[in-house]
Amino acid sequence: MRMRAAVLEEFGQPLEVQEVELADPKPGEVLVRIVNCGVCHTDMYTASGADPSGYAPAVLGHEGAGVVEKVGDGVTSVQAGDHVVTLFSPQCGECVHCVDPRTNLCMAIRAEQNLGHLPDGTVRLSRPGSGEDIRHFMGTSTFAEYTVMPEIALAKIDPEAPLDRACLFACGLSTGLGAAMNTAKVTEGSTCVVFGAGMVGLGAVAGCRLSGAERIICVDLSDDRLALAEGQGATDLFKADENTVERLLEMSEGGFGYDFTFEATGLVNVMAQAVETARMAWGLCTIAGVAGKGETLDVIPRWLITGRRVAGSSFGGVKGREGVPKLVDLYMQGEIDVDPFISHRITLDEVNKGFDLMHAQDGIRSVIEF
Ligand code: CU
Ligand code: ZN
Protein backbone atom coordinates (compact mmCIF):
# COMPACT_ATOMS: atom_id res chain seq x y z
CA MET A 1 0.00 0.00 0.00
CA ARG A 2 0.95 3.63 -0.46
CA MET A 3 1.03 5.92 2.57
CA ARG A 4 2.59 9.12 3.80
CA ALA A 5 5.53 9.01 6.17
CA ALA A 6 8.29 11.25 7.52
CA VAL A 7 11.59 9.93 6.19
CA LEU A 8 15.05 10.66 7.52
CA GLU A 9 16.90 11.01 4.21
CA GLU A 10 20.07 12.65 5.42
CA PHE A 11 21.43 13.24 8.92
CA GLY A 12 21.26 16.83 10.10
CA GLN A 13 18.53 17.66 7.58
CA PRO A 14 14.77 18.10 8.19
CA LEU A 15 12.65 14.96 7.78
CA GLU A 16 10.92 14.72 4.40
CA VAL A 17 7.24 13.83 4.45
CA GLN A 18 6.52 11.79 1.34
CA GLU A 19 4.72 8.80 -0.16
CA VAL A 20 6.22 5.49 0.92
CA GLU A 21 5.35 1.92 -0.02
CA LEU A 22 4.42 -0.41 2.85
CA ALA A 23 4.25 -4.16 2.22
CA ASP A 24 1.73 -6.51 3.84
CA PRO A 25 2.50 -8.03 7.24
CA LYS A 26 4.39 -11.33 7.09
CA PRO A 27 3.84 -14.16 9.62
CA GLY A 28 3.96 -12.84 13.17
CA GLU A 29 3.52 -9.25 12.00
CA VAL A 30 0.68 -6.76 12.23
CA LEU A 31 -0.46 -3.79 10.14
CA VAL A 32 -1.39 -0.86 12.40
CA ARG A 33 -3.08 2.39 11.38
CA ILE A 34 -1.38 5.09 13.44
CA VAL A 35 -3.81 7.57 15.00
CA ASN A 36 -1.40 9.56 17.20
CA CYS A 37 2.33 9.74 17.74
CA GLY A 38 4.45 11.76 20.16
CA VAL A 39 7.64 13.47 19.01
CA CYS A 40 10.47 12.38 21.33
CA HIS A 41 14.10 13.40 21.90
CA THR A 42 15.33 10.06 20.59
CA ASP A 43 13.84 10.83 17.17
CA MET A 44 15.54 14.22 17.12
CA TYR A 45 18.83 12.78 18.39
CA THR A 46 18.86 10.20 15.60
CA ALA A 47 17.86 12.74 12.95
CA SER A 48 20.73 15.00 14.02
CA GLY A 49 23.28 12.30 13.21
CA ALA A 50 24.82 12.48 16.69
CA ASP A 51 24.02 8.79 17.22
CA PRO A 52 26.70 6.77 15.42
CA SER A 53 24.41 3.72 15.29
CA GLY A 54 21.73 5.64 13.37
CA TYR A 55 20.80 4.70 9.79
CA ALA A 56 19.10 6.34 6.80
CA PRO A 57 16.88 6.36 4.89
CA ALA A 58 14.48 5.42 7.67
CA VAL A 59 10.99 6.29 8.81
CA LEU A 60 11.39 7.71 12.32
CA GLY A 61 8.89 7.78 15.19
CA HIS A 62 8.34 5.46 18.13
CA GLU A 63 5.62 6.91 20.40
CA GLY A 64 2.70 5.56 18.45
CA ALA A 65 -0.84 4.49 19.23
CA GLY A 66 -3.32 3.21 16.70
CA VAL A 67 -5.71 0.55 15.53
CA VAL A 68 -4.90 -2.90 14.17
CA GLU A 69 -5.96 -3.14 10.51
CA LYS A 70 -4.74 -6.58 9.52
CA VAL A 71 -2.69 -9.42 11.01
CA GLY A 72 -0.19 -11.80 9.41
CA ASP A 73 -0.27 -15.60 9.68
CA GLY A 74 0.06 -17.02 13.15
CA VAL A 75 -0.83 -13.81 14.97
CA THR A 76 -3.18 -14.68 17.81
CA SER A 77 -2.91 -12.03 20.50
CA VAL A 78 -4.31 -9.09 18.54
CA GLN A 79 -6.94 -8.78 15.83
CA ALA A 80 -8.33 -6.15 13.49
CA GLY A 81 -9.94 -3.33 15.43
CA ASP A 82 -7.83 -3.69 18.58
CA HIS A 83 -6.30 -0.50 19.97
CA VAL A 84 -2.56 -0.78 20.49
CA VAL A 85 0.45 1.12 21.76
CA THR A 86 3.70 0.51 19.86
CA LEU A 87 6.66 -0.87 21.80
CA PHE A 88 10.26 -0.18 20.84
CA SER A 89 11.00 -2.53 23.74
CA PRO A 90 9.08 -5.73 22.87
CA GLN A 91 8.04 -8.63 25.07
CA CYS A 92 8.34 -12.04 23.44
CA GLY A 93 7.48 -13.81 26.68
CA GLU A 94 9.96 -16.60 26.03
CA CYS A 95 13.55 -15.34 26.03
CA VAL A 96 15.91 -15.57 29.00
CA HIS A 97 14.98 -12.04 30.07
CA CYS A 98 11.24 -12.20 29.42
CA VAL A 99 10.84 -15.18 31.75
CA ASP A 100 12.73 -13.37 34.52
CA PRO A 101 10.80 -10.83 36.60
CA ARG A 102 13.93 -8.75 37.20
CA THR A 103 14.16 -7.20 33.73
CA ASN A 104 12.24 -6.02 30.69
CA LEU A 105 15.13 -6.25 28.22
CA CYS A 106 13.64 -8.71 25.72
CA MET A 107 16.36 -10.22 23.54
CA ALA A 108 14.12 -11.75 20.85
CA ILE A 109 14.57 -9.23 18.02
CA ARG A 110 17.28 -6.92 19.32
CA ALA A 111 19.97 -7.49 16.69
CA GLU A 112 17.69 -6.99 13.67
CA GLN A 113 15.83 -4.09 15.28
CA ASN A 114 19.13 -2.28 15.86
CA LEU A 115 19.79 -2.58 12.12
CA GLY A 116 16.39 -1.16 11.21
CA HIS A 117 15.00 -4.50 10.11
CA LEU A 118 11.92 -6.46 11.11
CA PRO A 119 12.72 -9.75 12.91
CA ASP A 120 13.24 -11.76 9.69
CA GLY A 121 16.03 -9.41 8.62
CA THR A 122 14.07 -7.65 5.87
CA VAL A 123 12.05 -4.42 5.63
CA ARG A 124 8.42 -3.67 4.65
CA LEU A 125 9.16 -0.05 3.77
CA SER A 126 10.41 1.01 0.34
CA ARG A 127 10.52 3.88 -2.09
CA PRO A 128 7.73 3.90 -4.66
CA GLY A 129 9.18 3.43 -8.12
CA SER A 130 12.77 2.46 -7.38
CA GLY A 131 11.85 -0.04 -4.66
CA GLU A 132 14.87 1.03 -2.63
CA ASP A 133 14.71 -0.24 0.97
CA ILE A 134 13.75 2.20 3.73
CA ARG A 135 14.51 1.07 7.26
CA HIS A 136 12.29 0.77 10.33
CA PHE A 137 13.44 3.06 13.14
CA MET A 138 13.40 1.35 16.59
CA GLY A 139 11.22 -1.36 15.10
CA THR A 140 8.31 1.07 15.15
CA SER A 141 8.46 3.77 12.40
CA THR A 142 5.36 5.56 13.64
CA PHE A 143 5.83 8.92 11.88
CA ALA A 144 3.62 7.32 9.25
CA GLU A 145 -0.03 6.73 8.50
CA TYR A 146 0.55 2.99 8.85
CA THR A 147 3.24 0.69 10.16
CA VAL A 148 3.99 -3.02 10.11
CA MET A 149 5.35 -4.32 13.40
CA PRO A 150 5.98 -7.65 15.11
CA GLU A 151 3.08 -8.89 17.20
CA ILE A 152 5.40 -9.04 20.25
CA ALA A 153 5.93 -5.28 20.01
CA LEU A 154 2.30 -4.26 20.37
CA ALA A 155 0.50 -3.66 23.66
CA LYS A 156 -3.26 -4.07 23.43
CA ILE A 157 -4.97 -1.39 25.50
CA ASP A 158 -8.44 -0.43 26.69
CA PRO A 159 -10.32 0.64 23.53
CA GLU A 160 -11.93 3.46 25.51
CA ALA A 161 -8.55 5.12 26.17
CA PRO A 162 -8.02 8.19 23.97
CA LEU A 163 -5.11 7.40 21.64
CA ASP A 164 -3.63 10.92 21.76
CA ARG A 165 -2.91 10.29 25.42
CA ALA A 166 -2.22 6.56 25.15
CA CYS A 167 0.66 7.21 22.73
CA LEU A 168 2.63 8.90 25.51
CA PHE A 169 2.79 5.54 27.28
CA ALA A 170 4.84 4.22 24.34
CA CYS A 171 7.96 5.91 25.66
CA GLY A 172 8.57 8.79 28.06
CA LEU A 173 5.64 8.48 30.43
CA SER A 174 6.03 4.73 31.03
CA THR A 175 9.78 5.24 31.40
CA GLY A 176 9.26 7.70 34.25
CA LEU A 177 6.40 5.90 35.96
CA GLY A 178 8.23 2.59 35.73
CA ALA A 179 11.53 3.99 37.01
CA ALA A 180 9.75 4.80 40.28
CA MET A 181 7.30 1.90 40.47
CA ASN A 182 9.33 -1.00 38.97
CA THR A 183 13.02 -0.22 39.08
CA ALA A 184 13.30 1.72 42.33
CA LYS A 185 10.15 0.24 43.88
CA VAL A 186 9.59 3.45 45.85
CA THR A 187 8.20 2.67 49.30
CA GLU A 188 5.45 4.32 51.29
CA GLY A 189 6.50 7.28 53.40
CA SER A 190 9.85 7.61 51.61
CA THR A 191 11.68 10.74 50.48
CA CYS A 192 12.40 11.19 46.75
CA VAL A 193 14.22 13.62 44.49
CA VAL A 194 13.55 13.74 40.74
CA PHE A 195 16.11 15.58 38.60
CA GLY A 196 14.50 16.88 35.42
CA ALA A 197 10.86 17.76 34.79
CA GLY A 198 10.51 16.63 31.19
CA MET A 199 8.26 13.76 30.21
CA VAL A 200 10.34 11.12 32.01
CA GLY A 201 10.89 13.16 35.17
CA LEU A 202 7.24 14.13 35.43
CA GLY A 203 6.33 10.47 35.01
CA ALA A 204 8.75 9.61 37.82
CA VAL A 205 7.12 12.24 40.05
CA ALA A 206 3.73 10.62 39.35
CA GLY A 207 5.21 7.17 40.01
CA CYS A 208 6.61 8.31 43.38
CA ARG A 209 3.21 9.74 44.30
CA LEU A 210 1.39 6.54 43.28
CA SER A 211 3.89 4.57 45.41
CA GLY A 212 3.03 6.61 48.50
CA ALA A 213 6.19 8.70 48.82
CA GLU A 214 5.90 11.33 51.55
CA ARG A 215 8.22 13.91 50.08
CA ILE A 216 8.87 14.38 46.35
CA ILE A 217 11.32 17.12 45.42
CA CYS A 218 11.49 17.96 41.72
CA VAL A 219 14.61 19.73 40.45
CA ASP A 220 14.66 21.68 37.19
CA LEU A 221 15.76 24.99 35.67
CA SER A 222 12.34 26.00 34.35
CA ASP A 223 9.51 27.41 36.49
CA ASP A 224 6.96 26.29 33.88
CA ARG A 225 8.10 22.70 34.03
CA LEU A 226 8.29 22.78 37.83
CA ALA A 227 4.68 23.96 37.89
CA LEU A 228 3.77 20.82 35.93
CA ALA A 229 5.68 18.74 38.47
CA GLU A 230 3.51 20.17 41.21
CA GLY A 231 0.47 18.99 39.27
CA GLN A 232 1.93 15.47 39.21
CA GLY A 233 2.41 15.41 42.97
CA ALA A 234 5.76 17.04 43.70
CA THR A 235 5.74 18.36 47.27
CA ASP A 236 8.78 20.64 46.79
CA LEU A 237 9.85 22.53 43.67
CA PHE A 238 13.57 23.17 43.46
CA LYS A 239 15.25 25.51 41.01
CA ALA A 240 18.66 24.06 40.14
CA ASP A 241 21.79 26.19 40.51
CA GLU A 242 25.50 25.66 41.18
CA ASN A 243 24.78 24.67 44.81
CA THR A 244 22.09 22.11 44.04
CA VAL A 245 23.73 19.22 45.91
CA GLU A 246 24.58 21.23 49.04
CA ARG A 247 21.11 22.76 49.23
CA LEU A 248 19.37 19.44 48.71
CA LEU A 249 21.45 17.73 51.38
CA GLU A 250 20.74 20.58 53.79
CA MET A 251 17.02 20.14 53.20
CA SER A 252 17.17 16.40 53.93
CA GLU A 253 16.61 14.83 57.32
CA GLY A 254 19.88 14.83 59.23
CA GLY A 255 21.64 16.01 56.08
CA PHE A 256 21.92 12.37 54.99
CA GLY A 257 20.17 12.64 51.63
CA TYR A 258 17.09 10.94 50.18
CA ASP A 259 15.75 7.39 50.04
CA PHE A 260 15.24 7.48 46.26
CA THR A 261 16.70 9.79 43.65
CA PHE A 262 15.93 9.78 39.92
CA GLU A 263 17.89 11.21 37.04
CA ALA A 264 15.80 12.15 34.00
CA THR A 265 17.87 14.67 32.09
CA GLY A 266 20.49 12.53 30.35
CA LEU A 267 23.23 14.88 31.58
CA VAL A 268 26.10 13.03 33.22
CA ASN A 269 26.87 15.82 35.72
CA VAL A 270 23.24 15.68 36.88
CA MET A 271 23.54 11.90 37.17
CA ALA A 272 26.45 12.44 39.57
CA GLN A 273 24.29 14.85 41.59
CA ALA A 274 21.57 12.23 41.77
CA VAL A 275 24.05 9.65 43.11
CA GLU A 276 25.50 12.06 45.65
CA THR A 277 22.11 13.13 47.03
CA ALA A 278 20.90 9.56 47.49
CA ARG A 279 20.82 8.81 51.18
CA MET A 280 23.92 7.58 52.88
CA ALA A 281 23.46 3.98 54.08
CA TRP A 282 20.57 2.95 51.78
CA GLY A 283 19.71 5.57 49.17
CA LEU A 284 19.00 4.25 45.68
CA CYS A 285 19.74 6.39 42.64
CA THR A 286 17.90 5.37 39.47
CA ILE A 287 19.28 6.60 36.16
CA ALA A 288 16.54 6.93 33.53
CA GLY A 289 18.03 9.64 31.29
CA VAL A 290 19.98 8.65 28.20
CA ALA A 291 23.46 10.16 27.99
CA GLY A 292 25.27 10.87 24.74
CA LYS A 293 27.35 8.08 23.21
CA GLY A 294 30.80 7.84 24.80
CA GLU A 295 30.00 9.99 27.85
CA THR A 296 30.98 8.62 31.24
CA LEU A 297 29.59 9.02 34.72
CA ASP A 298 31.97 10.24 37.41
CA VAL A 299 31.10 8.63 40.74
CA ILE A 300 33.26 8.92 43.83
CA PRO A 301 33.59 5.36 45.22
CA ARG A 302 33.10 6.62 48.78
CA TRP A 303 29.50 7.48 47.89
CA LEU A 304 28.94 3.79 47.19
CA ILE A 305 30.98 2.31 50.04
CA THR A 306 28.84 4.35 52.41
CA GLY A 307 25.72 2.62 51.17
CA ARG A 308 24.35 4.46 48.16
CA ARG A 309 23.33 2.26 45.23
CA VAL A 310 22.89 3.05 41.56
CA ALA A 311 20.41 1.38 39.21
CA GLY A 312 19.73 1.89 35.53
CA SER A 313 16.25 1.80 34.08
CA SER A 314 15.32 1.31 30.44
CA PHE A 315 11.67 1.93 29.53
CA GLY A 316 11.07 2.03 33.28
CA GLY A 317 11.68 -1.69 33.57
CA VAL A 318 8.20 -2.10 32.08
CA LYS A 319 7.54 -5.39 30.33
CA GLY A 320 5.58 -3.68 27.61
CA ARG A 321 2.80 -6.05 26.62
CA GLU A 322 1.77 -6.63 30.25
CA GLY A 323 2.80 -3.36 31.81
CA VAL A 324 1.65 -0.67 29.36
CA PRO A 325 -2.03 -1.74 29.41
CA LYS A 326 -1.92 -1.61 33.23
CA LEU A 327 -0.48 1.90 33.21
CA VAL A 328 -3.14 2.99 30.70
CA ASP A 329 -5.75 1.51 33.06
CA LEU A 330 -4.34 3.62 35.90
CA TYR A 331 -4.79 6.65 33.68
CA MET A 332 -8.37 5.62 32.86
CA GLN A 333 -9.06 5.28 36.61
CA GLY A 334 -8.02 8.91 37.05
CA GLU A 335 -4.74 8.10 38.83
CA ILE A 336 -2.48 9.79 36.28
CA ASP A 337 -3.13 13.24 34.84
CA VAL A 338 -1.88 12.89 31.27
CA ASP A 339 -3.44 15.97 29.62
CA PRO A 340 -0.83 18.52 30.82
CA PHE A 341 1.90 16.62 28.97
CA ILE A 342 0.42 17.42 25.56
CA SER A 343 1.69 20.92 24.86
CA HIS A 344 1.25 21.00 21.09
CA ARG A 345 -0.85 19.17 18.52
CA ILE A 346 0.62 19.02 15.05
CA THR A 347 0.11 17.31 11.71
CA LEU A 348 2.56 14.86 10.13
CA ASP A 349 3.67 17.63 7.77
CA GLU A 350 4.67 19.70 10.80
CA VAL A 351 6.91 17.00 12.31
CA ASN A 352 10.02 19.18 11.95
CA LYS A 353 8.20 21.88 13.90
CA GLY A 354 7.91 19.30 16.67
CA PHE A 355 11.72 19.05 16.67
CA ASP A 356 12.04 22.85 16.71
CA LEU A 357 9.72 23.13 19.71
CA MET A 358 11.75 20.49 21.53
CA HIS A 359 14.96 22.26 20.67
CA ALA A 360 13.54 25.51 22.09
CA GLN A 361 12.41 23.55 25.19
CA ASP A 362 8.90 24.78 24.45
CA GLY A 363 6.41 22.49 26.20
CA ILE A 364 6.61 18.82 27.08
CA ARG A 365 5.26 16.89 24.09
CA SER A 366 4.07 17.59 20.58
CA VAL A 367 1.60 14.95 19.48
CA ILE A 368 0.99 14.26 15.81
CA GLU A 369 -2.65 13.77 14.83
CA PHE A 370 -3.16 11.70 11.70
CU1 CU B 1 11.10 8.24 23.12
ZN1 ZN C 1 11.78 -11.70 25.19
Image (cartoon, helix red, strand yellow):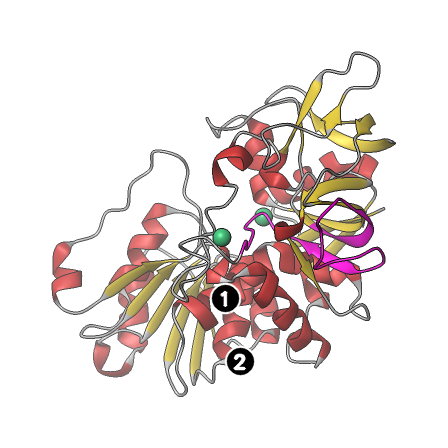
Residue 238 in view (yes/no): no
Give the alpha-carbon distance from disc 2 to disc 1, as whole Å. Answer: 11 Å
Residue 193 against residue 175 in the figure, above or below: below
Is disc 1 surrounded by few (<14), some (14 to 19) or many (20+) residues within 10 Å?
many
State the SS at label 1. helix
> Which quadrant is the N terminus positioned in?
top right
Is 282 positioned to the left or the right of 153 in the image?
Answer: left
Residue 110, image x and y in percent?
49, 40
Q: Which residues are magenta?
A: 64-92
246 relative to 367 in the view: left or right: left
- Residue 11's place in the image compared with 287, above or below, is above
The image shows residue 107 at horizontal and vertical percentages of 46, 47
User: At 35% across and 72% down in the image, what residue appears?
Assistant: 260
Q: Secondary structure at mark 2?
A: helix
In x, y percent, where is residue 296? 29, 41
Q: Is residue 83 magenta?
A: yes
| Extreme residue in the bottom direction | 189
Q: Indicate the amino acid at tag 2.
A: Leu
Q: Residue at x 63, y 55 (%)?
A: 170
Q: Quadrant of residue 125?
A: top right
**Marking on residue 178:** 1
Determine crowd level at label 2: few under 14, some 14-19, many 20+ residues with C-alpha closer than 10 A.
many
- Viewer-proximal residue among 32 and 196: 32
Q: Which percent across, then down, holds residue 196?
A: 48, 58
**Quarter of the image where one finds residue 4:** top right
Residue 295 falls inside the magenta stretch: no
Residue at the front extreme, as displayed: 74
Foreground: 73 or 89? 73
Per the image, the residue denoted by label 2 is 210
